[in-house]
Amino acid sequence: MTADLAVVGGGVIGAFVVREALRRHPGWRVLLLERSSIGSGATEWSAGVSFPLAATPRHRDLVNAASPRYEALRGTPAGAFVRPVTMVYVVRRDGLEAFRQRVVGADVRPVTATERRRVARFLPDARIGPGEEMVTHDGQGFAVNARAVAEALVALAADRVEIQLGQRVEAVEPDDGGYRLTTEHGEWHARRVVTACGAWTPPPVHATPLPGVPGARRKRIAALHARLPVTLDDPLVYFVDDDLFILPLGTGTALVSFYRDAWDTDPDTCDGRPGAEDLRQGRAALGRRSAAAAAAVSGGRAFCDLYTENRLPVVTGHPDLPDLVAIRGGSGSGVRFAPALAAEALQALTQPAPARA
Ligand SMILES: Cc1cc2nc3c(=O)[nH]c(=O)nc-3n(C[C@H](O)[C@H](O)[C@H](O)COP(=O)(O)OP(=O)(O)OC[C@H]3O[C@@H](n4cnc5c(N)ncnc54)[C@H](O)[C@@H]3O)c2cc1C
């Protein structure tokens, strides 16, 4: 039987593609092919933070397209894994105006005395320079348990999706008005295909790799876990210039995200566990802001993601192959942009096929 759409990759982006497809086309039969299990790639280890921050107009469009789609999950089982978070930013006073311009849909204001006390409670020795200020904005920030959301989105659609786990798609071939997708264990047929393979190379078409994303490379992403006196109601603190944030994960545990400058990591070598160098670099980065927090590190997590040069994910078709779309380059923001990217992929599918020469 021919599916109306095959989605290759069951990470958070593939899961949102399934949701978006069935929202737009309730009658479609969707096939999801996943090499392992739902949400088991970068999605599983993600901090899942969605800052309403945009460095470029394109980032702004993605934030604006993603936010209402996350909002729409409220009241559904997936919505239980999306929680609003108060965002506190430590920014240099002379960079405040530029920072203000980056915030999408909310006004930046100084933190209140209460918000400052809440930060001081779990980061009593935080090093905040005389030229820096703590600011926040109302609403808009949230943290996503990305694996749980991916699983919930797929489960919600279970009556209209055929889910094939443990199926690594090795090739996609044009065939009979659609595509034939081949794995080691079998073959499937679909009229349309969206690939969302994260840091893995998407399956070749006609034995030809999909056009590459110029300049894209796989980057390691690591985060620490620290035993800090936080609760889920505490704010996230983002030291903007350090690209370091501390996110309360639950009572007594926080996640610390820091910039890990390690490239060309093969996703097949990632199992979620941090290496000694991840921990060393993370402790050093955190220690520059709080020695006490660095001393409270208890472990961490690490995986990788495909980064583009301008940190913008791409949704690309193939000039000669209609109804085949690849979503690539999560660039460390794949969770926050997932619903927007899924919408763009569906949009690209429904556009007329480009004229052939
Ligand atoms: C520690 C860490 C912290 C992060 N923090 C944030 C954050 O705060 N905010 C944010 O937005 N992002 C964050 N990210 C990045 C974010 O997690 C990724 O951008 C996002 O999960 C990418 O989703 P994906 O669906 O593209 O990829 P993945 O989750 O990697 O999913 C791809 C899926 O495709 C499957 N697959 C691959 N090839 C094939 C094939 N040939 N056939 C079948 N299946 C295939 C894989 O098994 C996998 O399940 C973080 C990542 C890490 C590791």
Image (cartoon, rainbow, N blue to C red):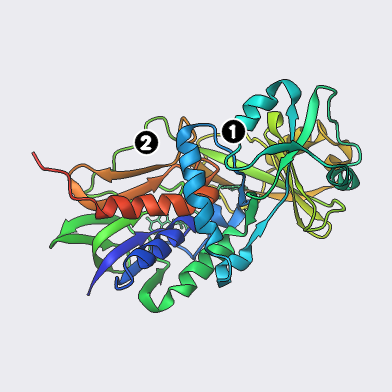
In the rendered structure, the answer to whether residue 35 lies left or right of residue 135 reads: left
Marker disc for residue 213: 2
Quadrant of image for the C terminus: top left
Nearest-to-viewer mark from 1 and 2? 1
Q: Please indicate, yes or no, whether residue 183 appears anywhere in the rendered image.
A: no
Look at mark 1 in the image and give the residue it sits on. 102
In the rendered structure, the answer to whether residue 261 lies left or right of residue 6 reads: right
Badge 2: how crowded within 10 Å, few (<14), some, or many (20+)? some
Q: Position of residue 355 (x, y in %)?
A: 12, 43
291 or 54, nearer to the observer: 54
287 or 141, nearer to the observer: 141
Q: Position of residue 91 (x, y in %)?
A: 73, 30
Badge 1: how crowded within 10 Å, few (<14), some, or many (20+)? some
Mark 1 and mark 2: span between their CA atoms? 26 Å
Asked if residue 101 is positioned above or below residue 342 in the image, the reply reads above
Q: Which residue occupies 85% across, 23% down? A: 130
Q: Position of residue 20 (x, y in %)?
A: 40, 61
- Could you tell me the amino acid type at mark 2? Val
In the rendered structure, the answer to whether residue 319 lies left or right of residue 5 reads: left
Q: Which residue occupies 84% across, 57% down? A: 252
